[in-house]
Image: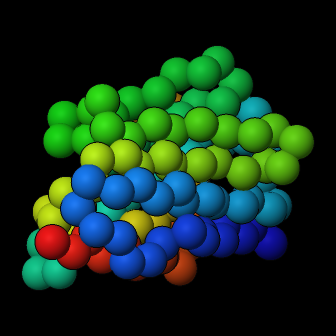
Amino acid sequence: EVQLVESGGGLVQAGGSLRLSCAASGISLDEYVIGWIRQVPGKEREVISCISSSDGFTTYEDSVKSRFTISSDYAKNTVYLQMNQLKLEDTAVYYCAADYPFCSTRVANYRYWGQGTPVTVSS
């Protein structure tokens, strides 16, 4: 059974930082890529970052580039999203999801999903 479990969300002031974790089981980071997808209330989900752990390839959506960093830990089968310089518009539910075999910007491509973790950025 494939499971993706996010953690690390919460309430943070604008300009602050959070680190999200995505613990994966039932899949190997060697084969699957992991994306971070967020959903702002009232809007569609968007892929903001993705990592292919096997070759270190990463992608970032323009609005988070230079502020967010995605990384992975093979030993823990976990992917992280370090979020710095958080803005009010980063408030969303953040999901991690697995795709195979390449990173995609299409939300529908992601096969397995976590339950999501909420991030609220306050002024």
Is residue 39 in sight in this rendering? Answer: no
Instruction: Please determine whether, in this image, residue 14 is positioned above or below residue 105.
Output: below
114 displayed left or right of 12 = right
Where is residue 107 shown, x and y percent of the image? 33, 56
Identify the residue shown where x is 11% and y is 81%: 42
Where is residue 88 shown, x and y percent of the image? 16, 65
Which one is in front, 67 or 13? Answer: 13
Q: Quadrant of residue 29?
A: top right
Instruction: Please determine whether, in this image, residue 45 is positioned above or below residue 122.
Output: above
- Quarter holding the C terminus? bottom left
80 displayed left or right of 60 = right
Instruction: Name the residue furthest right.
Output: 75
Q: Quadrant of residue 72?
A: top right
55 displayed left or right of 84 = right
- Quarter holding the N terminus? bottom right
Identify the residue shown where x is 75% and y is 33%: 30
Q: Quadrant of residue 64?
A: top left
Identify the residue shown where x is 47% and y is 27%: 58
Is residue 69 in sight in this rendering? Answer: yes
Instruction: Please determine whether, in this image, residue 122 is positioned above or below residue 60.
Output: below
4 displayed left or right of 48 = right
Identify the residue shown where x is 84% and y is 49%: 76
Where is residue 102 shown, x and y percent of the image? 51, 32
Where is residue 12 shown, x and y percent of the image? 35, 70
Which one is in front, 72 or 108? Answer: 72
Which one is in front, 100 or 71? Answer: 71
